[in-house]
Image (cartoon, rainbow, N blue to C red):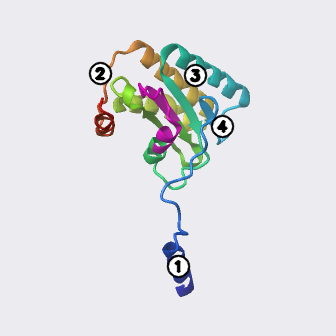
Amino acid sequence: MKLVISLAAIAAALGCGAPATAVHPQRPAGPVLDQANVIPASDEAALSDRLSRYYETSGNAIVVASVTSLDGETIEDYANELFNEWGIGDADTDRGELLLLAPNDHQARIEVGCGLEGTVTNGIAEQIMQTKLIPQYHPQHFLEGTLAGVNALIGYLDTSTPANDNGPHSQVCLARAKGSGQ
């Protein structure tokens, strides 16, 4: 027992412990990453084409990612970090959304960019999660749940008006806008 504790203490002192944040996958060339292999290849290609066309016509980027593990991070932290690392959405408008699925960790999340948070509020994202994704993911119908979530996001973006305005609303987005002089 003392040997194990001593080795752990040495490893921690030398910085050999677990990383502070997970190593995230590289951004894919298109809007779909299926690292967890839950979307059949033909459906993945069709979804990628659909989301690429949607971005071209609307300016709203929706990215779908399935990962094999959250590497001990919370789904909220992992999604936020991945969203920011990948730079989802146009840099000027930040109109992007990430639908993240971690099936081995039994977690999913919709991360919304600052430019869309007045339209897709946390409440709307949670409603889509509870009514479209989770009912399908629970019996492991990942393709069906992902498509239902994407359809709901696109439907909502195409038919709604912003809750207040197109500006940032969360503390994180307000701070980011203030720091950039917007």
Of the residues shown, which amino acid type is indicated by label 3? Leu
* Picture residue at 53% right of the left edge, 46% below the top: 106
> Which residue in the protein does label 4 denote?
38
Q: Residue 51 carries which label?
A: 3
User: Which numbered disc, 2 or 1, marks the residue that appears first in the sequence?
Assistant: 1
The local secondary structure at tag 4 comes to: loop
Q: Does the magenta stretch include residue 90?
A: yes
Residue range of the region highlighted in magenta in the rendering? 81-99
The percent position of residue 58, horizontal first and vertical second, equals 49, 15
Q: Residue 152 carries which label?
A: none
Disc 1 vs disc 4: Cβ atoms closer than 8 Å? no
The percent position of residue 134, horizontal first and vertical second, equals 50, 35
User: Which numbered disc, 3 or 2, marks the residue that appears first in the sequence?
Assistant: 3
> Which residue in the protein does label 2 denote?
163
* Picture residue at 53% right of the left edge, 19% below the top: 55
When the figure is inspected, residue 156 is found, relative to residue 78, above or below; the finding is above
> Which residue in the protein does label 1 denote?
10
Pick the quarter of the image with the C terminus: top left
User: Which numbered disc, 3 or 4, marks the residue that appears first in the sequence?
Assistant: 4
